[in-house]
Amino acid sequence: MLALVASVLLAAPALAQGTPAAARYGDENIAAALYADGVPVAGREWMLALRFTPKASEWHGYWSNPGDAGQGMRLLLDLPDGWQAGEARYPVPQRLTISGLMNHIYEGPYTVLVPVTVPAGAAIRTAPRITGHVEYLACTDKICVPQDALLEARQGGDFARWRAEVAPPLDAGASFEIGRRVLRLAIPLPASVSLADPHVFIGNENLVDYAAPQTFRRLGDVLTVDIPLSEYRADTPSAVVGILAFDGLTGVEFGAIPGVVPSGGELVAGSQGAAIPPLWTLVLGALAGGLLLNIMPCVFPILSLKALSLVRAGESEAKARAEGLAYTAGVVLACVALGALLLALRAAGEQVGWAFQLQEPGVVVALLVLAAMITANFAGMFELPSLSVSGGGKPAGAFATGLLAAFVATPCTGPFMAAALGAALLLPVPQALLLFALLGLGLALPFLLLGFIPALRRMLPRPGPWMERFRRIMAIPMGLTALALVWLTVQLGGRPFALIALLLVIGVLLALFVVGRLQRAGKMAWPAFGLVAAPFIAFALIALPSVYEAGGAAAKESIHNPQAFSAEALSQARASGRPVFVWFTADWCVTCKVNEAAAIERDGVREAFEAAGVVTMVGDWTVRDEAITQFLTQQGAAGVPLYLWYAPGASAPQQLPQVLTADLLVAQASGDR
């Protein structure tokens, strides 16, 4: 459609001044006729009407701003000297979304009113002869055809009905402001006005994302609207005009000037920036979510680090307290730093969410190298005497453990975390950072309590020679973590990318082996590390970007054969009248993978879904995807996993628990039969 429209626009010459001698394209697909409302009166507004009538139901015309594709009409009128045509007034348009593009259209016959200002001193005996020329576009879902017609105003027409059909101008001024990637409107509207299906059609072109969800809130007699901005937006406009549709038929025309748009209010429609719970509930949610994160599958790969800290914490009261505080400081600092970076990136216009760090191939490669180094340290290949992640009783080591624990353990969201982290993306920065800090405090709380409660420490085994053996054993889960990160590099950048990353790991391990040999011989060791590792690091820095393939791994198979998530696919699935199950996942989210293996990818669930006619859809967030990030934000979620169930005819989805069971999904499907 875009190609067809572009070819039409390029082929159509600019309209000449005055009426052409003949129509170039004709109006056989959508006929156009001009009507006049009686005899004009000097000094008053006289109304003309352009009536468009499609020859068949599949043809549609366009509003003045056609949306992502199409073309509005261009009208020339031959009026007596001094007579002036005003802005055309349109009915409320309809929305047509094709392949993620939204068009503002009219299906069926429609009328555009054109007010004409008649000079006060005009001598009028009869209605003057008014002629003109109009160009417009007629489209179906498959083809667009340019249309034009020569016009001559005739008397008649149903002006009473046509006036009732156009959107009347709002008799009060609206205001707007440009926020972080969003246009915010404040439109005066009595609270008694019903909003069955509100939508704002913006008349300014290339200002907003037409297909993006809009959010409506009420504060008394003021309606506020949040609309995501277009990535192609240029300068901030001096005014914003448009039509506020109450439903599919009625609405008002408004004009907005720069001003203050209030925040908060009762959510009327849309989910982006949904009503934020009280701060005290978010504080408790962040704290409880961080605490429960200790038992979530996301944390399993680094339990070896925590286990050694637990054992070392029992050596003495002073050491236990110092280690508990240092570990807590590392966790909280990492969570706050990640949260601050997340907020800064979003403020800069990036569509990122929680765990964004594991969507970056470079970060994953760095973590792979770090996991391999920790594995080698646990296995006794070398020692880091001043900053060992396994060096219990040393605050520096505990601090480093806390940093790493938070960095790796927080990608997935657990119970209670979703609401807190989702709200953190909408709250003022100080409150958002408070929630991130409390998340870290919850994650570190067990170790902090161990440091300050002797009774808990007495429950731990006494330190002894077994600890060195335990440390060697803990190299196994850490090595498995490194293998999991190798697999993740394949998913992010493809096999050649992962092979180069493995070569880098081999080079670093070879350098650490040399360091360990020199340490045991009592010689200076770390300069040798630089000499051995430098060529591998230099090669990786050059080769990794050149072989990187975004989304390099093959698509994941599922017994449900789900559709890939998109806003358009979800809309079509919901329109089918069948239940819809959507899950959002990522290869770096261990909780997601556990849920898929234990609950989603089960034959019993597949059979129940088939019996209920469930449409399944998956959103893969392994690599950054702005559409998925935006949708997660609309649902009040900052990360994955997220599981949504759309019952037939439901206006909003049901958010399922973040820890799924097969029985829960079978029961959900059975309930929608």
Image (tube, rainbow, N blue to C red):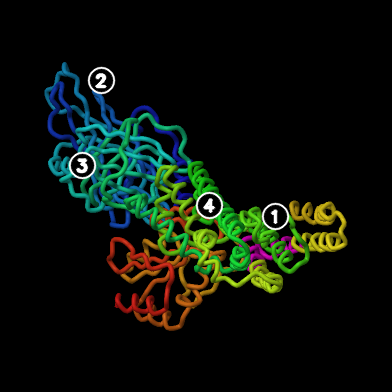
Contact, mark 2 vs mark 4 (Cβ under 8 Å): no
Question: Mark 3 against mark 4, which lies toward the viewer?
Answer: 4
Q: Secondary structure at mark 3?
A: loop
> Which one is in front, 87 or 313?
313
Question: Mark 2 against mark 3, which lies toward the viewer?
Answer: 3
Q: Which residue is tagged 2?
A: 81
Q: Residue 454 appears at what percent x and percent y?
A: 52, 64
Residues under labels 2 and 3: Cα distance?
47 Å
Which span is picked out in magenta? 484-503
Q: Which residue is tagged 3?
A: 220
Amino acid under label 4? Val
Q: Residue 542 appears at what percent x and percent y?
A: 75, 52
Instruction: Say if residue 69 shows up in the picture.
Output: no
Question: Mark 2 against mark 4, which lies toward the viewer?
Answer: 4
Amino acid under label 3? Gly
Contact, mark 2 vs mark 3 (Cβ under 8 Å): no
